[in-house]
Image (cartoon, helix red, strand yellow):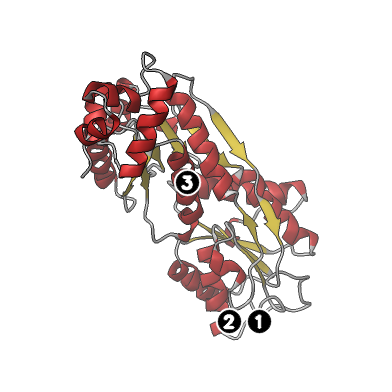
Amino acid sequence: MVRLKDIAERAGVSIMTVSKVLRDAPDISGATKSRVRALAQEMGYVPHALAAGLRTRATRLLGLVIPGIINPVYARLIMAIEDRAFELGFELFLAHTLEKPEREELVLRRLLARRVEGLFVIPVARLGDTPGIYAELIRLNIPTVVLGLAPRFCDRFSRVANDEVGASREITQHLLGLGHRRIAFLAGPTVSPSAQARLEGYRRGLRDAGVEFDDRLIFQCGSTVEDGFQAGLELVRESLGVTALQGVNDLVAIGALNGLLSQGVRVPEDVSIAGFGNILSAENARVPLTTVREPKFRLGIAAMEIMHKLLQGGPPEQRVLRAELLPRRSTAAPAVNTLI
Protein backbone atom coordinates (compact mmCIF):
# COMPACT_ATOMS: atom_id res chain seq x y z
CA MET A 1 0.00 0.00 0.00
CA VAL A 2 1.36 3.43 -0.96
CA ARG A 3 2.05 5.68 2.03
CA LEU A 4 2.44 9.44 2.36
CA LYS A 5 6.12 8.80 3.10
CA ASP A 6 6.55 7.08 -0.28
CA ILE A 7 5.01 10.04 -2.13
CA ALA A 8 7.12 12.51 -0.13
CA GLU A 9 10.35 10.70 -1.05
CA ARG A 10 9.48 10.66 -4.75
CA ALA A 11 8.42 14.32 -4.71
CA GLY A 12 11.35 15.51 -2.62
CA VAL A 13 9.10 17.20 -0.04
CA SER A 14 8.11 16.55 3.56
CA ILE A 15 5.35 14.18 4.64
CA MET A 16 3.53 17.21 6.09
CA THR A 17 3.59 18.91 2.67
CA VAL A 18 2.09 15.82 1.00
CA SER A 19 -0.61 15.69 3.68
CA LYS A 20 -1.45 19.35 3.14
CA VAL A 21 -1.61 18.91 -0.64
CA LEU A 22 -4.04 16.01 -0.34
CA ARG A 23 -6.17 18.09 2.05
CA ASP A 24 -5.98 21.06 -0.37
CA ALA A 25 -4.46 23.31 2.31
CA PRO A 26 -4.23 26.95 1.15
CA ASP A 27 -0.58 27.49 2.17
CA ILE A 28 0.87 25.20 -0.54
CA SER A 29 1.67 26.56 -4.00
CA GLY A 30 -0.35 25.49 -7.01
CA ALA A 31 2.72 24.06 -8.75
CA THR A 32 3.58 21.86 -5.76
CA LYS A 33 -0.03 20.69 -5.46
CA SER A 34 -0.15 19.70 -9.14
CA ARG A 35 3.17 17.80 -8.96
CA VAL A 36 2.34 15.93 -5.73
CA ARG A 37 -1.21 15.03 -6.83
CA ALA A 38 0.09 13.71 -10.15
CA LEU A 39 2.62 11.55 -8.32
CA ALA A 40 -0.01 10.29 -5.87
CA GLN A 41 -2.28 9.29 -8.75
CA GLU A 42 0.59 7.66 -10.66
CA MET A 43 1.63 5.64 -7.60
CA GLY A 44 -1.97 4.50 -6.92
CA TYR A 45 -2.37 6.22 -3.57
CA VAL A 46 -5.74 5.61 -1.88
CA PRO A 47 -6.58 7.93 1.07
CA HIS A 48 -7.52 6.32 4.39
CA ALA A 49 -11.10 7.53 4.81
CA LEU A 50 -11.38 6.59 8.49
CA ALA A 51 -8.19 8.42 9.46
CA ALA A 52 -9.28 11.49 7.51
CA GLY A 53 -12.67 11.36 9.21
CA LEU A 54 -11.08 11.29 12.65
CA ARG A 55 -9.14 14.45 11.81
CA THR A 56 -11.95 16.39 10.16
CA ARG A 57 -15.02 14.79 11.82
CA ALA A 58 -16.31 14.24 8.26
CA THR A 59 -16.62 10.57 7.32
CA ARG A 60 -18.20 11.10 3.88
CA LEU A 61 -20.51 8.19 4.72
CA LEU A 62 -24.29 8.13 4.21
CA GLY A 63 -26.86 5.53 5.22
CA LEU A 64 -29.78 4.31 3.10
CA VAL A 65 -32.51 2.34 4.88
CA ILE A 66 -35.20 0.61 2.78
CA PRO A 67 -37.74 -2.17 3.45
CA GLY A 68 -35.93 -4.73 1.26
CA ILE A 69 -33.84 -4.92 -1.89
CA ILE A 70 -36.08 -7.68 -3.29
CA ASN A 71 -38.78 -5.10 -4.12
CA PRO A 72 -38.02 -3.95 -7.70
CA VAL A 73 -39.45 -0.49 -6.99
CA TYR A 74 -36.27 0.49 -5.16
CA ALA A 75 -33.67 -0.46 -7.79
CA ARG A 76 -33.52 2.82 -9.74
CA LEU A 77 -33.97 4.86 -6.57
CA ILE A 78 -30.89 3.24 -5.01
CA MET A 79 -28.94 3.59 -8.25
CA ALA A 80 -29.67 7.31 -8.48
CA ILE A 81 -28.73 8.06 -4.88
CA GLU A 82 -25.53 6.02 -5.07
CA ASP A 83 -24.55 7.51 -8.43
CA ARG A 84 -25.00 11.11 -7.29
CA ALA A 85 -23.39 10.39 -3.91
CA PHE A 86 -20.36 8.93 -5.72
CA GLU A 87 -20.02 12.07 -7.84
CA LEU A 88 -20.01 14.17 -4.67
CA GLY A 89 -17.43 11.98 -2.94
CA PHE A 90 -19.71 10.09 -0.55
CA GLU A 91 -20.02 6.37 0.13
CA LEU A 92 -23.33 4.66 0.84
CA PHE A 93 -24.23 2.02 3.41
CA LEU A 94 -27.40 0.07 2.54
CA ALA A 95 -29.58 -1.55 5.22
CA HIS A 96 -32.96 -3.34 5.20
CA THR A 97 -35.76 -3.08 7.76
CA LEU A 98 -37.92 -5.91 6.35
CA GLU A 99 -40.83 -3.72 7.55
CA LYS A 100 -40.00 -4.57 11.19
CA PRO A 101 -39.87 -1.65 13.67
CA GLU A 102 -37.37 -3.39 15.97
CA ARG A 103 -35.02 -4.11 13.05
CA GLU A 104 -35.41 -0.53 11.81
CA GLU A 105 -34.21 0.86 15.14
CA LEU A 106 -31.27 -1.54 15.18
CA VAL A 107 -30.04 -0.72 11.67
CA LEU A 108 -30.40 3.03 12.28
CA ARG A 109 -28.36 2.78 15.48
CA ARG A 110 -25.70 0.72 13.70
CA LEU A 111 -25.44 3.36 10.98
CA LEU A 112 -25.11 6.10 13.60
CA ALA A 113 -22.37 4.05 15.27
CA ARG A 114 -20.51 4.08 11.94
CA ARG A 115 -20.68 7.88 12.11
CA VAL A 116 -22.70 8.42 8.93
CA GLU A 117 -23.14 12.09 8.14
CA GLY A 118 -26.71 11.71 6.88
CA LEU A 119 -29.53 9.22 6.40
CA PHE A 120 -32.01 8.36 3.66
CA VAL A 121 -34.94 6.43 5.11
CA ILE A 122 -38.13 4.75 3.99
CA PRO A 123 -39.72 4.47 7.45
CA VAL A 124 -41.51 1.39 8.68
CA ALA A 125 -45.17 2.38 8.78
CA ARG A 126 -46.87 2.16 12.17
CA LEU A 127 -49.45 3.97 14.24
CA GLY A 128 -48.80 5.90 17.43
CA ASP A 129 -46.29 8.42 18.73
CA THR A 130 -42.84 9.20 17.36
CA PRO A 131 -40.58 6.14 17.80
CA GLY A 132 -37.61 6.74 20.07
CA ILE A 133 -35.00 6.40 17.33
CA TYR A 134 -36.64 9.13 15.22
CA ALA A 135 -36.88 11.44 18.22
CA GLU A 136 -33.15 10.79 18.68
CA LEU A 137 -32.39 11.70 15.07
CA ILE A 138 -34.19 14.99 15.63
CA ARG A 139 -32.36 15.63 18.91
CA LEU A 140 -28.97 14.84 17.36
CA ASN A 141 -29.81 16.97 14.32
CA ILE A 142 -28.80 14.18 11.91
CA PRO A 143 -29.47 15.29 8.30
CA THR A 144 -32.28 12.96 7.24
CA VAL A 145 -34.24 12.67 3.99
CA VAL A 146 -37.41 10.58 4.06
CA LEU A 147 -38.13 8.82 0.76
CA GLY A 148 -41.80 8.64 -0.20
CA LEU A 149 -44.88 9.55 1.76
CA ALA A 150 -44.08 9.43 5.45
CA PRO A 151 -45.88 8.81 8.74
CA ARG A 152 -46.68 11.88 10.82
CA PHE A 153 -43.69 11.28 13.08
CA CYS A 154 -41.46 12.20 10.12
CA ASP A 155 -43.01 15.63 9.52
CA ARG A 156 -39.91 17.46 10.74
CA PHE A 157 -37.56 15.77 8.26
CA SER A 158 -36.83 16.65 4.66
CA ARG A 159 -38.85 14.55 2.23
CA VAL A 160 -38.96 13.59 -1.45
CA ALA A 161 -42.12 11.86 -2.65
CA ASN A 162 -44.24 11.15 -5.69
CA ASP A 163 -47.69 12.70 -6.06
CA GLU A 164 -49.35 9.39 -5.23
CA VAL A 165 -52.84 10.79 -4.77
CA GLY A 166 -52.70 12.54 -8.14
CA ALA A 167 -51.22 9.51 -9.93
CA SER A 168 -53.82 7.12 -8.53
CA ARG A 169 -56.58 9.55 -9.41
CA GLU A 170 -55.27 9.65 -12.99
CA ILE A 171 -55.43 5.86 -13.25
CA THR A 172 -59.05 5.88 -12.04
CA GLN A 173 -59.88 8.64 -14.52
CA HIS A 174 -58.31 6.55 -17.30
CA LEU A 175 -60.56 3.60 -16.45
CA LEU A 176 -63.61 5.86 -16.16
CA GLY A 177 -62.75 7.45 -19.50
CA LEU A 178 -62.88 4.00 -21.12
CA GLY A 179 -66.43 3.62 -19.83
CA HIS A 180 -65.92 1.60 -16.64
CA ARG A 181 -68.14 2.34 -13.63
CA ARG A 182 -67.69 -0.78 -11.48
CA ILE A 183 -64.00 -0.46 -10.61
CA ALA A 184 -62.59 -2.57 -7.79
CA PHE A 185 -59.61 -1.34 -5.80
CA LEU A 186 -57.06 -3.78 -4.37
CA ALA A 187 -55.87 -1.82 -1.34
CA GLY A 188 -52.59 -2.11 0.55
CA PRO A 189 -51.83 -2.12 4.29
CA THR A 190 -53.92 0.38 6.23
CA VAL A 191 -50.85 1.69 8.13
CA SER A 192 -49.00 2.52 4.89
CA PRO A 193 -49.17 6.23 3.94
CA SER A 194 -48.58 5.36 0.27
CA ALA A 195 -51.33 2.75 0.21
CA GLN A 196 -53.78 5.17 1.80
CA ALA A 197 -52.80 7.95 -0.61
CA ARG A 198 -53.49 5.69 -3.58
CA LEU A 199 -56.87 4.70 -2.15
CA GLU A 200 -57.66 8.40 -1.69
CA GLY A 201 -56.73 9.06 -5.33
CA TYR A 202 -59.17 6.35 -6.40
CA ARG A 203 -61.90 7.94 -4.26
CA ARG A 204 -61.26 11.36 -5.77
CA GLY A 205 -61.31 10.00 -9.31
CA LEU A 206 -64.74 8.48 -8.71
CA ARG A 207 -66.03 11.61 -7.01
CA ASP A 208 -64.86 13.89 -9.83
CA ALA A 209 -66.79 11.73 -12.32
CA GLY A 210 -69.91 11.62 -10.17
CA VAL A 211 -69.58 7.87 -9.58
CA GLU A 212 -70.74 6.73 -6.15
CA PHE A 213 -68.11 5.10 -3.96
CA ASP A 214 -68.98 1.49 -3.07
CA ASP A 215 -66.96 0.04 -0.18
CA ARG A 216 -67.84 -3.49 -1.35
CA LEU A 217 -65.41 -2.88 -4.22
CA ILE A 218 -62.48 -2.27 -1.85
CA PHE A 219 -60.49 -5.44 -1.23
CA GLN A 220 -57.93 -5.26 1.57
CA CYS A 221 -55.02 -7.36 0.43
CA GLY A 222 -51.32 -6.60 0.82
CA SER A 223 -48.45 -5.65 -1.44
CA THR A 224 -47.16 -8.84 -3.10
CA VAL A 225 -47.92 -10.88 -6.22
CA GLU A 226 -49.40 -13.64 -4.05
CA ASP A 227 -51.68 -11.11 -2.31
CA GLY A 228 -52.92 -9.95 -5.70
CA PHE A 229 -53.43 -13.52 -6.94
CA GLN A 230 -55.67 -14.33 -3.96
CA ALA A 231 -57.58 -11.06 -4.42
CA GLY A 232 -58.21 -11.99 -8.07
CA LEU A 233 -59.68 -15.33 -7.00
CA GLU A 234 -61.85 -13.54 -4.42
CA LEU A 235 -63.16 -11.16 -7.08
CA VAL A 236 -64.32 -14.14 -9.13
CA ARG A 237 -66.03 -15.71 -6.09
CA GLU A 238 -67.78 -12.47 -5.09
CA SER A 239 -69.23 -11.83 -8.58
CA LEU A 240 -69.89 -8.10 -8.00
CA GLY A 241 -70.23 -7.08 -11.63
CA VAL A 242 -66.75 -5.55 -11.75
CA THR A 243 -65.46 -4.54 -15.18
CA ALA A 244 -62.10 -3.11 -14.06
CA LEU A 245 -59.75 -3.26 -11.11
CA GLN A 246 -56.99 -1.00 -9.88
CA GLY A 247 -54.10 -2.44 -7.86
CA VAL A 248 -52.28 -0.55 -5.12
CA ASN A 249 -49.04 -1.46 -6.91
CA ASP A 250 -47.84 -3.38 -9.94
CA LEU A 251 -47.05 -6.54 -7.99
CA VAL A 252 -50.61 -6.77 -6.68
CA ALA A 253 -52.05 -5.96 -10.12
CA ILE A 254 -49.88 -8.61 -11.83
CA GLY A 255 -50.90 -11.15 -9.19
CA ALA A 256 -54.58 -10.34 -9.74
CA LEU A 257 -54.10 -10.59 -13.50
CA ASN A 258 -52.61 -14.08 -13.11
CA GLY A 259 -55.39 -15.09 -10.72
CA LEU A 260 -58.12 -13.97 -13.12
CA LEU A 261 -56.47 -15.63 -16.12
CA SER A 262 -56.26 -18.88 -14.14
CA GLN A 263 -60.06 -18.78 -13.80
CA GLY A 264 -60.70 -18.21 -17.49
CA VAL A 265 -61.30 -14.45 -17.17
CA ARG A 266 -59.87 -12.61 -20.17
CA VAL A 267 -57.89 -9.39 -19.77
CA PRO A 268 -58.90 -6.86 -20.99
CA GLU A 269 -61.85 -8.39 -22.89
CA ASP A 270 -63.71 -9.30 -19.66
CA VAL A 271 -61.89 -7.16 -17.06
CA SER A 272 -59.42 -4.30 -17.34
CA ILE A 273 -56.51 -4.14 -14.88
CA ALA A 274 -54.21 -1.26 -13.92
CA GLY A 275 -51.27 -1.12 -11.52
CA PHE A 276 -48.99 1.50 -10.02
CA GLY A 277 -45.22 1.95 -10.26
CA ASN A 278 -44.09 0.62 -13.68
CA ILE A 279 -41.72 -2.05 -12.42
CA LEU A 280 -39.83 -3.94 -15.14
CA SER A 281 -42.20 -6.91 -15.10
CA ALA A 282 -45.24 -4.67 -15.70
CA GLU A 283 -44.47 -4.24 -19.39
CA ASN A 284 -43.57 -7.93 -19.69
CA ALA A 285 -46.58 -9.34 -17.84
CA ARG A 286 -48.75 -11.96 -19.57
CA VAL A 287 -50.84 -8.98 -20.65
CA PRO A 288 -48.73 -5.78 -20.64
CA LEU A 289 -49.94 -3.77 -17.66
CA THR A 290 -51.37 -0.27 -17.73
CA THR A 291 -49.70 1.63 -14.88
CA VAL A 292 -48.03 4.89 -13.89
CA ARG A 293 -44.30 5.45 -14.15
CA GLU A 294 -42.95 6.83 -10.90
CA PRO A 295 -39.92 9.09 -11.47
CA LYS A 296 -37.75 6.85 -9.29
CA PHE A 297 -34.40 7.97 -10.70
CA ARG A 298 -35.33 11.66 -10.47
CA LEU A 299 -36.56 11.06 -6.94
CA GLY A 300 -33.16 9.64 -5.99
CA ILE A 301 -31.31 12.56 -7.57
CA ALA A 302 -33.58 15.05 -5.78
CA ALA A 303 -33.02 13.24 -2.48
CA MET A 304 -29.23 13.51 -2.82
CA GLU A 305 -29.49 17.18 -3.80
CA ILE A 306 -31.48 17.89 -0.64
CA MET A 307 -29.02 15.88 1.45
CA HIS A 308 -26.11 17.85 0.07
CA LYS A 309 -27.81 21.10 1.08
CA LEU A 310 -28.58 19.74 4.55
CA LEU A 311 -24.94 18.79 5.05
CA GLN A 312 -24.02 22.37 4.20
CA GLY A 313 -26.38 23.69 6.86
CA GLY A 314 -29.46 24.26 4.73
CA PRO A 315 -33.06 24.04 6.05
CA PRO A 316 -35.35 21.01 5.67
CA GLU A 317 -36.96 20.79 2.24
CA GLN A 318 -39.86 18.87 0.73
CA ARG A 319 -40.37 18.03 -2.94
CA VAL A 320 -43.24 16.26 -4.71
CA LEU A 321 -42.70 14.78 -8.19
CA ARG A 322 -45.37 13.84 -10.71
CA ALA A 323 -45.84 10.38 -12.21
CA GLU A 324 -46.77 9.55 -15.81
CA LEU A 325 -49.70 7.40 -16.97
CA LEU A 326 -48.68 4.50 -19.27
CA PRO A 327 -51.72 2.91 -20.96
CA ARG A 328 -51.02 -0.64 -22.20
CA ARG A 329 -53.00 -3.67 -23.37
CA SER A 330 -54.46 -4.58 -19.96
CA THR A 331 -57.12 -1.85 -20.16
CA ALA A 332 -59.88 -1.37 -22.73
CA ALA A 333 -63.55 -0.41 -22.94
CA PRO A 334 -65.83 -2.66 -20.84
CA ALA A 335 -67.61 -5.64 -22.37
CA VAL A 336 -71.40 -5.86 -22.41
CA ASN A 337 -71.30 -8.80 -19.99
CA THR A 338 -68.75 -9.53 -17.30
CA LEU A 339 -67.59 -12.77 -15.72
CA ILE A 340 -66.91 -11.20 -12.32
In this rendering, does residue 265 appear at all?
yes
User: Of the residues shown, which amino acid type is indicated by label 3?
Assistant: Asp
Residue pictured at 23% horizontal, 23% vertical:
14
CA distance separating discs 3 and 2: 40 Å
User: Of the residues shown, which amino acid type is indicated by label 1?
Assistant: Arg
Could you tell me if the residues under marks 1 and 2 are in contact, i.e. CB atoms within 8 Å? yes
Q: Which mark is residue 83?
A: 3
Q: Nearer the viewer, mark 3 or mark 1?
A: 3
Residue pictured at 39% horizontal, 40% vertical:
121
Residue pictured at 36% horizontal, 40% vertical:
41
Q: Earlier in the sequence, mark 3 or mark 2?
A: 3
Q: Nearer the viewer, mark 3 or mark 2?
A: 3
Q: Is residue 97 above or below residue 4?
A: below
Categorize mark 1 by other alpha carbons within 10 Å: few (<14), some (14-19), many (20+): some
Q: Which residue is mark 1?
A: 266
Judged from the image, the secondary structure of the residue bearing numbered disc 3 is helix
Categorize mark 3 by other alpha carbons within 10 Å: few (<14), some (14-19), many (20+): some
Q: Which residue is mark 2?
A: 261
CA distance separating discs 1 and 2: 6 Å
